[in-house]
Amino acid sequence: MGGMVTLSKGLGVLGLVVLAATLQAAEGARSVTELQQRLAAHVGEARFNAALWGVKVESLDTGATLFEHNAERLLKPASNNKLYTGALALDRLGPGFRIRTSVYAAGKPGRSGVVKGDLLIYGRGDPSFAARFNNGDYGKSLAPLVEAIAAAGIKRVKGDLVGDESYFRGPPMGSGWTWDDLQYYYGAEVSALTLEDNTVDLVFQPGAVEGAACEVITRPKTDYLTFVNFSETVAKGGRRDITLQRPIGQNVVQVFGSLPVGSADLTDAVAVHDPALFFVTQLRAALAARGIRVEGQLRTVNWLERQVKPFDAARFSEVAHVESRPMAELVKQMMKPSQNLYAHLLLLQVAANVATNVPTRAWRTTEDDGIAVLRTFLGEAGIARGEVLVEEGSGLSRSALVTPQATVELLKFMAKHRYAGAFRESLPIAGVDGTLRARLKGTAAEKNVLAKTGTLRYVNALSGYVTSAAGERLVFSMMLNNYNPEGNRSGRAELDDVAVMLAEFAGRSAK
């Protein structure tokens, strides 16, 4: 701890003792024993009596275990689950892998540019049709697909515009997701045709006068959602709060609440139902803006319909296609903001591209196959069976269970992996970006800790890498379950305290 301390002449012996203890605590632990004592004291605080901590810290340099507490206990990981999905996607598919979206027609367009039948958009789970991949520009999300269709010479489609999302088998959500998450951006439906994270961003503005309804602006511009607006503009100083309700299986959004006259905009987002239909709805508008007219209807085809009438690519011509951003970028855009939809799509992508040798494959969901591939991968990483009990890709499931020990083993494995660089670059950096951008600022952990966060109700987790004050590379996993912080500091703050202790650790472990 830098700087000079001036002692008053009247400072007694007791004051000197207290001051010395304070300075020692601020300086960071100077030995493994002292670090263990501090960490044990922290997780043993009385406020955690009803909660459950799980922690493990190891040295990447020496292989020594610096601290562990309930490291073999199964705990809810929340979005720490994404560490497993990201590692799996990089390992099995590689950082350069791209996802192909195909445009099929019964035949190539003639000289006049007319497609006489349907134009079918066959999705394979590309999440990068989104503004987040284009510096927030919604207008660019579908531009590559529109240009590919135009480059194929298509000017008019006499048939329907069909969105085929049958590439993945299973329901439009991960196992263990709860119904009350589904209207929110973090619980958006899963589809092989995904646009704008399957959500619509919303901007709410107060009306011009008191008593008027608040204005609702959609981004991207769309008429796919119908709004029933019960909101109201109130007097200055009034309540500023907007609440949304989108019933399951509908695209009708009810808007409640109020904004004061002249107040700043308020933003929110709502997930859409039937993302494939949303995709082709927006695509038709984008094609029209490019001068390409679709005369037929909008339709979608899902995996259940393809069980009855399988897709036969031999009957079609691939008239155009586009490819996603590379897998390394997809994993980064999944990991840093903790994007649940992307995480589950990547698990499904692995399943769809990697043979699982399961005889009953045709009757299993793609999610089942993805978990089967994950189990094989975990074995290769040296993680014992039974230490990772996950059922989908994101950690949104309330049923997922993982041990801190398993997560440390995964992080150690990926630190030596051939794609270690891509994996590390996907992690949030403390005080800089992703879900850690506002955390650990002004501490020894800032720009030092690279870690995945995890948050559910009564669940907080943080797992990743940190370099100690002595230059030793450490790997850690900590999970705090069943913690109700009422009247106390948040679960995130409790985890951050541990991260700072590791970053300030001035000692070294022995081999």
Image (cartoon, grey):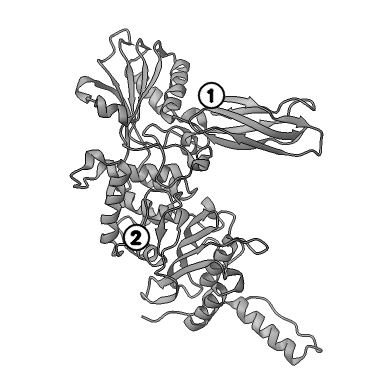
Q: Is residue 240 left or right of residue 388?
A: right
The percent coordinates of residue 20 (x first, y second) are 66, 85
> Which structural element holds mark 1?
loop
- Which quarter shows the C terminus? bottom left
Q: Is residue 203 left or right of residue 129?
A: right
Q: Are marks 1 and 2 in contact (CB under 8 Å)?
A: no
Tell me if residue 354 can be seen: yes
Which residue is most to the bottom? Answer: 13
Asked whether 207 or 290 is in front, the reply is 207
- Which quarter shows the N terminus? bottom right
Tell me if residue 330 can be seen: no
Q: Which mark is residue 414?
A: 2
> Which structural element holds mark 2?
helix
Total labels: the figure holds: 2
Asked whether 363 or 195 is in front, the reply is 363
Residue found 39% across the figure and 45% down from its top: 175
Residue found 56% across the figure and 57% down from its top: 431
Q: Which mark is residue 222?
A: 1
Q: Quadrant of residue 500?
A: bottom right
Front tag of 1 and 2: 1
Relative to residue 94, is residue 270 depicted above or below? above
Is the residue marked by circle 1 packed among few (<14), some (14-19), or many (20+) residues within 10 Å?
some
What residue type is disc 1 on?
Thr
For marks 1 and 2 on the same chain, the one whose residue lies earlier in the sequence: 1
Give the Cα separation between the discs numbered 1 and 2. 42 Å
The percent coordinates of residue 191 (x first, y second) are 39, 34
Is the residue marked by circle 2 packed among few (<14), some (14-19), or many (20+) residues within 10 Å?
many
The percent coordinates of residue 228 (x first, y second) are 62, 25
Q: Quadrant of residue 504?
A: bottom right
Q: Quadrant of residue 330?
A: top left
Residue found 71% across the figure and 80% down from its top: 5
